[in-house]
C-alpha cells in the first residue's frame, strides 16, 4: 500500500557562485534531486538502479580520462559529486531494503545496494582518478579543503589503489564479496521474527498491565512472543518467572542462529584476506588505521584502562545483585537473564526507584514532543511537518529550521513491523551541500507505538536523534566529502551519547514527561532516578568492553579451526561480570559485526569523549543555550571538515581525556 501525504519534491538550488560547475556535479545533483524512498514496485527500483549505474560509470569514465592541469574546482569537485552519487544511491537502497513493507521491493533494493557498493569499490581502486587527485596542487588551499583532499588520498591508499593491477582486481572482488556477505548477515537478522511460546498467563507474572493487555493467550492457551524489542525487553526487566526470562533471553540472543554462523565465518575470512592483500596483519589493523584510536593494540589498551576503572564498582554492585537473588533462591548464582531484573529490584528497594512507576510518565508521542522541544531550547531550531510521501503507516516526515532557513529534512519510523530493520539507527539518505541540496535522513527504531515507555527507551530515542541532528547540522559543507562520512568513525557516537545526559535532567523531563492525569513527573522521582542511575553502570560498561573485545578478536587474526562460540565466550567473559550462557549464540545476531566490524570499541571510546564534552555543559548549566550554540558551532556544524580531536579541542579549549569517564565508573 502506498501512502501519500503529498508528493515529494527535493529541489536543487545552485548558488550563483557555483554557476559554472563541472558536468559531474550538475548531473549528480539533478539525479539526487529526485530521491524516491517509496518505489512503486521492484521494477521501479531496478530502473532507478540502472539509471544510477549508467550515470556513475559515465562520470567515472569522464573523470578518469581527464587531461591537463588538475584542480580542486574541476577534478576534486567532479570526484566529490561522483562519490556522493554512489554513496547516496547505495545508502538509499540499503535503507529501502531495511524498511519497505514489500519483500520484492526489499530484495530489489538490496540487489541495487550491492551494485552501488561494487561501483564504489571500482571508484576507490581507480588509479587514473587517484592520479588526477594526487596531481592537485595544495599550495593556496584553505585548511579545510587541504584536509579533506589529504584524507581522501589516504583512503585511496588504504583501499589499495597504489597496488598493481592484478592486486587491485582481487581487492575489488573481495570488496564485492564482503558487501554481499554483510548484506546477507544483516538480512538474516532483520527478517527473523521468531515465535517464543510461553505456557499461559502465569509465565508473565510481574509484567506491567499494559504488557499483559497486549499479550493475551492465543487460541492454544499459550502466550506467543516475537523477538522484537517491545516483546523482549519488558520480559527481561519485569518477569518474576526466572524460566520465562531465560527462555526469552536465549531466544533473543539466538535469533539468526544457526543461519548466520557460516555467513559470519565467511565475512571474517573475506575481510582477513582483504587485509592480507593490502599488507596488513589482520582486518582490525586495517580498519583502525584511519580512526582516532589508530591501532588494535591501542584499542585493547583502552579497553583494559576502562576495565580497571570499572571493576571495583562493578564487583560491589554485583554483590548487591547476588544478595538480592539469594533472597529468592538461596543457592542460586546470577545468570545473564537475571541482571536487568535484579537491578530493577535493587533500584526499587535501595534507591526507591520503581521502573513500573517511572514508565507511566513516558509514551512515544510524549518522548518525541520532548525531544523536539529540547532541540528548540538548546539550539533555537524549530521542527515542523514536512508534506511528503512515506512508506508505511505511522511513518512521519519533518523539517528542521533555523528561522526561515531550512537546515534539513528527516523521517521518523519508530515502531516494529514485519521485515523491518530490528534495531535503532539513523540512516543518511542524502548528504547536504551548501547552496545545492539540504541533508535528508531517517530515524528507525522499534519502540511500542502506544502505551507506557521505559525511560531507557527514551534515552535510546534521544541518542539516535543525536545522530540525526549531527547529520542535518553538518550538512552544509562545500563538498560532500566534508560531511559525516569522512569523520573518524570512533567519534561519531560521542555527540549522541552526550545528548543522553538530558534524559536525566529534571528541567528537561518536566517539559514532556507526565502521567495519564497530566501530572508532570515529580522532581523527587527524578532525583531518585539519578541516585539509582549509577547502580549497575560499571557492570554495564564492562559488558560493552566484552562486546568490543569480541569484535576485535574476530577480526584480529583467528587461529586455524577456531570456534565462533569459544572465541566469543573467552573474549566477552574476560570483561563482563556475568559470563555468557553456553546456550547463547549472540554473535549470530550481533549486527555490528558487519557494520562496525572490529571497531565496536567505538561506543566505549565515544562515551569517554561524550562525558568529557559534558563537563563544559555541567559547568554552565545543562540547558544553557549559549553553551549549546558554542557546542553546535564547534562540534556539530563542521562535520568531517577537520579531525575529530580538533573539534573536541575547539569546544573544550584542551585535548580530550578520560578523567570524567573514570570518575563516572568509580564506586559510590
Image (tube, grey):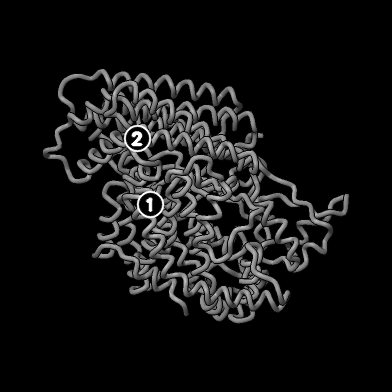
Residue 105 point in image, percent of width and height: 60, 30
* Disc 2 to disc 1: CB gap under 8 Å: no
Rendered residue at 40%/45% (across/down): 284
Residue 127 point in image, percent of width and height: 27, 24
Which residue extends farthest left? 139
Residue 172 in sight from this viewpoint = yes
Label 1: few (<14), some (14–19) or many (≥20) C-alpha neighbours in 10 Å: many
Could you tell me which secondary element the residue under label 2 belongs to? loop
Residue 195 point in image, percent of width and height: 74, 47
Rendered residue at 47%/59% (across/down): 545
The residue where tag 2 is placed is 13
Q: Is 24 located above or below residue 564 in the figure?
A: above
Rendered residue at 36%/19% (across/down): 58
Left or right? Give the position of 107 relative to 239: left
Residue 302 point in image, percent of width and height: 37, 60
For the N terminus, give its image quadrant.
top right
Q: From the viewer's side, name the closer residue of 129 and 109.
A: 129
Label 2: few (<14), some (14–19) or many (≥20) C-alpha neighbours in 10 Å: some
The residue where tag 1 is placed is 490
Which residue extends farthest front? 560
Q: Is label 2 or label 1 in front?
A: 1
Amino acid at each position: 500500500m502506498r501512502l501519500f501525504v503529498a508528493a515529494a519534491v527535493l529541489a536543487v538550488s545552485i548558488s550563483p557562485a557555483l554557476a559554472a560547475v563541472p558536468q559531474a556535479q550538475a548531473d549528480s545533483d539533478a539525479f539526487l534531486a529526485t530521491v524516491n524512498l517509496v518505489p512503486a514496485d521492484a521494477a521501479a527500483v531496478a530502473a532507478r538502479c540502472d539509471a544510477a549505474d549508467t550515470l556513475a560509470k559515465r562520470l567515472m569514465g569522464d573523470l578518469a580520462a581527464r587531461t591537463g592541469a588538475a584542480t580542486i574546482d574541476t577534478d576534486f569537485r567532479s570526484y566529490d559529486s561522483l562519490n556522493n552519487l554512489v554513496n547516496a544511491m547505495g545508502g538509499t537502497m540499503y535503507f529501502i531494503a531495511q524498511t519497505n513493507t514489500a519483500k520484492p521491493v526489499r530484495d530489489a533494493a538490496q540487489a541495487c545496494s550491492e551494485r552501488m557498493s561494487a561501483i564504489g569499490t571500482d571508484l576507490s581502486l581507480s588509479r587514473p582518478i587517484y592520479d588526477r587527485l594526487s596531481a592537485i596542487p595544495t599550495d593556496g588551499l584553505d585548511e579545510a579543503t587541504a584536509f579533506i583532499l589529504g584524507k581522501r588520498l589516504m583512503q585511496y591508499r588504504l583501499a589499495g589503489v597504489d597496488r598493481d593491477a592484478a592486486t587491485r582486481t582481487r581487492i575489488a572482488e573481495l570488496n564485492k564479496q564482503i558487501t554481499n556477505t554483510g548484506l546477507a548477515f544483516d538480512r538474516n537478522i532483520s527478517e527473523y521474527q521468531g515465535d517464543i511460546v510461553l505456557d499461559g498467563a502465569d509465565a508473565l507474572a510481574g509484567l506491567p498491565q499494559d504488557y499483559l493487555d497486549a499479550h493475551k493467550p492465543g487460541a492454544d492457551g499459550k502466550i506467543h512472543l516475537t523477538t522484537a524489542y517491545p516483546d523482549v525487553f519488558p520480559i527481561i526487566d519485569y518477569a518474576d518467572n526466572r524460566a520465562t526470562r531465560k527462555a526469552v533471553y536465549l531466544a533473543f540472543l539466538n535469533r539468526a542462529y544457526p543461519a548466520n554462523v557460516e555467513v559470519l565465518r565467511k565475512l571474517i575470512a573475506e575481510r582477513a584476506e582483504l587485509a592480507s592483500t593490502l599488507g596488513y596483519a589482520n582486518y582490525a589493523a586495517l580498519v583502525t588505521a584511519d580512526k582516532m584510536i589508530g591501532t588494535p593494540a591501542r584499542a585493547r589498551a583502552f579497553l583494559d584502562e576502562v576495565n580497571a576503572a570499572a571493576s571495583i564498582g562493578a564487583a560491589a554492585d554485583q554483590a548487591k545483585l547476588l544478595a538480592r537473588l539469594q533472597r529468592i533462591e538461596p543457592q542460586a548464582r546470577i545468570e545473564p537473564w537475571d541482571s536487568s531484573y535484579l537491578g530493577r529490584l535493587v533500584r526499587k528497594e535501595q534507591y526507591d526507584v520503581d521502573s513500573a512507576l517511572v514508565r507511566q510518565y513516558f509514551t512515544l508521542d510524549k518522548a518525541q514532543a520532548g525531544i523536539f522541544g529540547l532541540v528548540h531550547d538548546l539550539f533555537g531550531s524549530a521542527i515542523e511537518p514536512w508534506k511528503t510521501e512515506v512508506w508505511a503507516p505511522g511513518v512521519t516526515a519533518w523539517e528542521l529550521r533555523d528561522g526561515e532557513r531550512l537546515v534539513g529534512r528527516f523521517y521518523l519510523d519508530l515502531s516494529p513491523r514485519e521485515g523491518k530493520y530490528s534495531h535503532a539507527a539513523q540512516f543518511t539518505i542524502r548528504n547536504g551541500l551548501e547552496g545545492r541540496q539540504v541533508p535528508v535522513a531517517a530515524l528507525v527504531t522499534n519502540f511500542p507505538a502506544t502505551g507506557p515507555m521505559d525511560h531507557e527507551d527514551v534515552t535510546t530515542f534521544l541518542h539516535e536523534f543525536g545522530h540525526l541532528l549531527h547529520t542535518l547540522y553538518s550538512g552544509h559543507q562545500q563538498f560532500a566529502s566534508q560531511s559525516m562520512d569522512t569523520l573518524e568513525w570512533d567519534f561519531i557516537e560521542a555527540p549522541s551519547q552526550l545528548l543522553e545526559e538530558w534524559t536525566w535532567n529534571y528541567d528537561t523531563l518536566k517539559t514532556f514527561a507526565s502521567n495519564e492525569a497530566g501530572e508532570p513527573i515529580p522532581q523527587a522521582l527524578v532525583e531518585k532516578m539519578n541516585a539509582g542511575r549509577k547502580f549497575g553502570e560499571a557492570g554495564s560498561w564492562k559488558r560493552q568492553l566484552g562486546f568490543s573485545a569480541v569484535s576485535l578478536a574476530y577480526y584480529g587474526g583467528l587461529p586455524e579451526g577456531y570456534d565462533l562460540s569459544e572465541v566469543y565466550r573467552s573474549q566477552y567473559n574476560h570483561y563482563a561480570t556475568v559470563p555468557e550462557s553456553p546456550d547463547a549464540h549472540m554473535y549470530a545476531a550481533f549486527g555490528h559485526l558487519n557494520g562496525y566490524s572490529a571497531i565496536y570499541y567505538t561506543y566505549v571510546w565515544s562515551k569517554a569523549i561524550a562525558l568529557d564534552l559534558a563537563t563544559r555543559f555541567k559547568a554552565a548549566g545543562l540547558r544553557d543555550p549559549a553553551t549549546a550554540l558554542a557546542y553546535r558551532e564547534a562540534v556539530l556544524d563542521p562535520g568531517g571538515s577537520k579531525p575529530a580531536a580538533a573539534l573536541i579541542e575547539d569546544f573544550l579549549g584542551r585535548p580530550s581525556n578520560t578523567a570524567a569517564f573514570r570518575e563516572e565508573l568509580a564506586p559510590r
